[in-house]
Image (tube, rainbow, N blue to C red):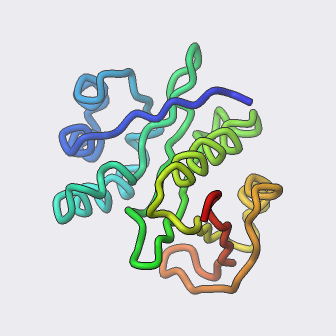
Amino acid sequence: MPDIRFVQLSPETLVALIDGDLAAASAAAGTELSPYLVEEAWLWRIRLDQVRADPASAEWIARAAVVQGVGVVGHGGFHGPPDDEGVVEVAYSVAPEHRRQGYAKAMLQALLERADADERVTAVRASIRPDNLASRATIAGSGFQKIGEQWDPEDGLEDVFLRPAKGS
């Protein structure tokens, strides 16, 4: 499985990505970022607002996913810190040119290890559209069980999965 390193994206980096300034974003991040991250400006707007409102959330939210010798292959993280019940929601995305190479699975495993290492986390949640077969395959075998459905204003109907944190 590929070795994923996550690079935290500072507010300065997020602003540069939103502005479409890849050179400034890469300089602020301290690593060469990819055009795919610029294309995800909608996400960085949400996360920038989130970090400004709650600076502690920065350690949980989306980060650039980097593979040595390859570069940025996508991004992954959580929607935020653990909620009042200790649940975090995982999120990951792989750039189109890097799909079907095991990066999503590697990102998910790294994120699950991150969640399992935090004593505040009791469970990891994932919400996936029924037609997103790739994401369903990614979580298969990682301990997730379907617990229900929800309506997402952007994605429509999603199945909701939950996986207990190791050690809880």
Splitting the image into 4 quarters, where does residue 48 fall?
Answer: bottom left
Splitting the image into 4 quarters, where does residue 102 fall?
Answer: top right
The number of numbered discs placed on residues in the rendered structure image is 0
Is residue 47 toward the left or the right of residue 122 in the image?
left
Quick one: quadrant of the C terminus? bottom right
Splitting the image into 4 quarters, where does residue 16 fall?
Answer: top left
Quick one: quadrant of the N terminus? top right
Q: Residue at x 25, y 38 (%)?
A: 13
Between 10 and 46, the one lying in front of the other is 10
Expressed as whole percent of the image width and height from the top left, the position of residue 90 reads 55, 59
Between 58 and 49, the one lying in front of the other is 58
Expressed as whole percent of the image width and height from the top left, the position of residue 135 reads 71, 57
Q: Residue at x 54, y 68 (%)?
A: 122
Q: Using the image, determine if residue 146 lies above or below residue 100.
A: below
Is residue 14 toward the left or the right of residue 105 in the image?
left
Is residue 106 toward the left or the right of residue 89 in the image?
right
Expressed as whole percent of the image width and height from the top left, the position of residue 70 reads 58, 19
Expressed as whole percent of the image width and height from the top left, the position of residue 82 reads 42, 67
Residue farthest toward the front in the current orientation of the protein = 167
Is residue 61 toward the left or the right of residue 87 in the image?
left
Residue farthest toward the top in the current orientation of the protein = 69
Between 4 and 167, the one lying in front of the other is 167
Q: Using the image, determine if residue 155 lies above or below residue 78.
A: below
Q: Residue at x 74, y 57 (%)?
A: 139
Q: Residue at x 67, y 38 (%)?
A: 106
